[in-house]
Image: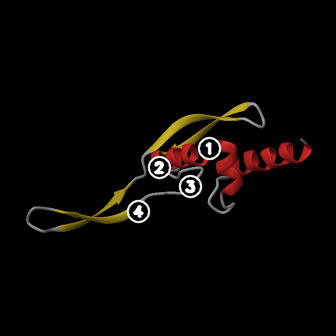
Amino acid sequence: MSRVCELTGKGPITGNKVSHANNKTRRRFLPNLNDVTLISDVLGQSFKLRVSAAGLRSVDHRGGLDAFLAKAKDEELSSNALKIKKAIAKAQAAA
């Protein structure tokens, strides 16, 4: 399972671990990923996604999964999230 947020595309970054003696060794900073179930109001369905804590706050700030995906860039989304976005757009066009 990859360590990448499905909604924001946030992944691991690298940096230095610095000791008290100022020795520097490479390390990885991993995103705070959580398995969450988000509900789409338009589709009336729930979806399980692996989302970072910051991404979850962004979803709440924008007013839910539907509003977040409407504004999200396609290259940041995972293939699963992209399918959900297209299904929501199709359902909104039909309604």
Q: CA distance from mark 4 to mark 1?
A: 29 Å
Q: Quadrant of the C terminus?
A: top right
Left or right of 62? Residue 46 is right
Residue type at mark 4: give it: Ile
Residue that mark 4 sits on:
13
Left or right of 16? Residue 86 is right
Residue at (62% x, 44% y) in the render: 63
Q: Is the C-beta separation of discs 4 and 3 under 8 Å? A: no
Decide which of tag 3 and tag 2 comes sooner along the chain: 3
Residue that mark 3 sits on:
8
Residue that mark 2 sits on:
54
Decide which of tag 4 and tag 1 comes sooner along the chain: 4
Decide which of tag 3 and tag 1 comes sooner along the chain: 3
Residue type at mark 2: give it: Ala
Residue that mark 1 sits on:
63
Question: Which numbered dot is residue 71?
Answer: none
**Residue 36: x, y in percent?**
55, 35
Residue type at mark 1: give it: Gly
Residue type at mark 3: give it: Thr
Decide which of tag 2 and tag 1 comes sooner along the chain: 2
